[in-house]
Image (tube, rainbow, N blue to C red):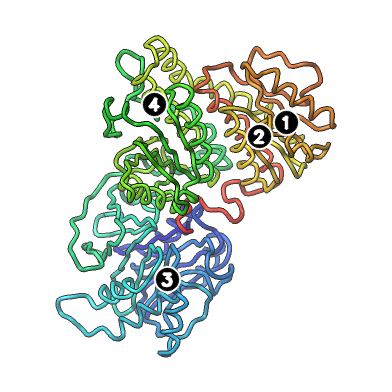
Amino acid sequence: MCGIVGYVGRQKAATILIEGLKRLEYRGYDSAGLAVLQNDGIEIAKKTGRVGNLVKEAKHHRFTGTTGISHTRWATHGGVTDANAHPHLSSDGKISLVHNGVIENYVSIKKFLSARGYTFSSETDTEVLCNLIAYHYAKEPADPDQSRFVTSVRQALRHAEGTYGIAVISPEAPGEIVAARKGSPLILGVGDNEFIVASDVAALISHTQNVVYLKDGEVVHLTPKDFSITTLDQEDVEAVVDRVTWTVDAAELNGHPHFMEKEIFEQPAALENSMRGRFSEDGSTAKFGGLNLGPVEFRQIDRFVFLGCGTAWHACLVAEHLLERFARVPVEADYASEFRYRNSPLSGNPLFFVISQSGETIDTLGALREAKRKGYKVLAINNTVGSTIARETDGGIYQHVGPEIGVASTKAFTSQLLVGAMLALHVARMRDMSFADGVEYVNALKGVPDLVRRVLEQAPRIKEIALRYAHYSDFLFLGRLSLFPIALEGALKLKEISYIHAEGYPAAEMKHGPIALISEKCPSVFFVPKSEIFNKLVSSIQEIKARNGKTIVITTEGCELPPGVADEIITIPDCHEAVLPIVATIPVQLLSYYIAVARGCDVDKPRNLAKSVTVE
């Protein structure tokens, strides 16, 4: 959460900073601001609301400097006000700071600084850290062998408890930026006599594809000509420069009104990319190069534990079902946020998987570290090369779906489902799945992109249904077995982007309480595929119709529904059980999207949400 962009080089900083903020606005849009080093000091502009408001405010300033920092905020400490917007300026005017994260001991630091004459104009923990750096800068003696500016930042961070990604400038250090991270992502873009530091690759990709992924506890010092990285203990760090493989076009709308719509329709190609090169030559199983586990080790695993948050947790639930169904191995799926604080008894030889699109989700990262602390091997399903989770796990599977800009996950989620299905096959073939069943499974996986295309062709009709139901205030989503998590996901998508109250349940649980909600004002979305429990699902629908409830039924080709049980029917291709959750996800993504648009909601930037949750 929150977006940081800093620039030092030869060009006017303000132009580059605002461009970067526009690309990072999905990380936070409560307020935005920038600070630029000018000949006469630091010039700051900041404004509540979207980056567009900042652009208007910036026109009243004459930004000419070539060094600056900027920020788009997702509020944690303090309300959404101009005063609480970043960048912050120390009360002595010597330090300006932008910050992503939470300084947990800011109250005691603020008390310490107040007693020494420092004043505060905001409610934020960030301003406290800004003044703490100023305090150390004021007391730090000049040292010809070290930068006083860098040393003061390092000294302040030693006293800061919590998480941070920061970028700092000072009028007494013209042409310099100091940045550091602990628990919040920070990336350095390496250009030609210019450098950009940002919390996401999207902010710098239009200027350079050469990046350095900073690690926790690292401090980077930037000038227009060079950069150096050290630890908080002043140890030198040798920078590893990676190259980003996607271009700025991947983060553009390309004619779509919203990134969410664009990413929904990108799913066939995204799923193809997730599968590419990952099947055995005989076409009977999936293979992964980064798991760092051989067949013997896999056979010794007696339990899998999947951890994730939000949409990723729904992918964990589907993986649980498929691994138990096809690999015949016990699986647990847990909220990462709960696992890290609950003392779960673990025995035997479990293997952990964490799922996170960004690779920076703070709760998932904490769960990963807790599992590793207890001596367990942890692998990841992740979309972001160079992310903290990717670096700290023992191995894993990259999704390769490209950048996902829309806050509500779409293509990353279906890719996670696909990777989970491939993993289930990988493990099953090492256990007792036959060659013939493996070939059938692989063929089903390879056919997924075309199945998804067939569902996407129904978008106009799903839009018509959405328009008929956009005025409702409550929804139920109901499914069973592998489609229960998709019911949860459908409810979450509708909540996230349209602000409609929605609940997901196993269909059989409806009569154990949720049926009390049924009325003409509460439609139900039912998943009714061809299966051995088809008739039981139809019975559940009839219970709703008996109480005058509206029903939207998502069913597979070849299913004959009794007359009158469905007010609306969306038909998806009949398909293998392993890929059914992927195919069934597409209608609820479209339904949620079109309902939100009809209600006039900003689907790419839903209220109170941000793309990557990097604070607790």
In the picture, the disc for residue 275 is 4
What distance separates the C-alpha of mark 2 from that of mark 4?
27 Å
Horizontal relation, residue 543 to residue 101: left or right: right
Report which residue position mark 2 lands on.
591
Closer to the observer: label 1 or label 3? 1
> Does the image show residue 40?
no
- The mark nearer the N terminus, 3 or 4, is 3
Q: Which residue lies furthest to the left in this view?
A: 145
Tell me what residue is drawn at x 36 percent, y 20 percent: 431
Disc 3 to disc 4, C-alpha distance: 44 Å
- N-term mark: 2 or 4: 4
Q: Distance between the residues labelled 4 and 1?
A: 33 Å
Left or right of 512? Residue 448 is: left
Q: Residue at x 33, y 58 (%)?
A: 196
- Whichever of labels 1 and 3 marks the residue nearer the N terminus, that label is 3
- Left or right of 596? Residue 198 is left
In terms of image quadrants, where is residue 433? top left
Dot 3 alpha-carbon crowd within 10 angstroms: few under 14, some 14 to 19, many 20 or more: many
Tell me which amino acid carries mark 3: Ala
SS at circle 4: helix
| Residue ID for mark 1 | 465
Q: Look at 52% across and 17% down and name the residue there.
A: 576
Front position among marks 4 and 1: 4
Q: What element carries label 1?
A: helix
**Image quadrant assignment for residue 159:** bottom left
Q: Residue furthest top?
A: 436
Dot 3 and dot 4 residues touching (CB under 8 Å)? no
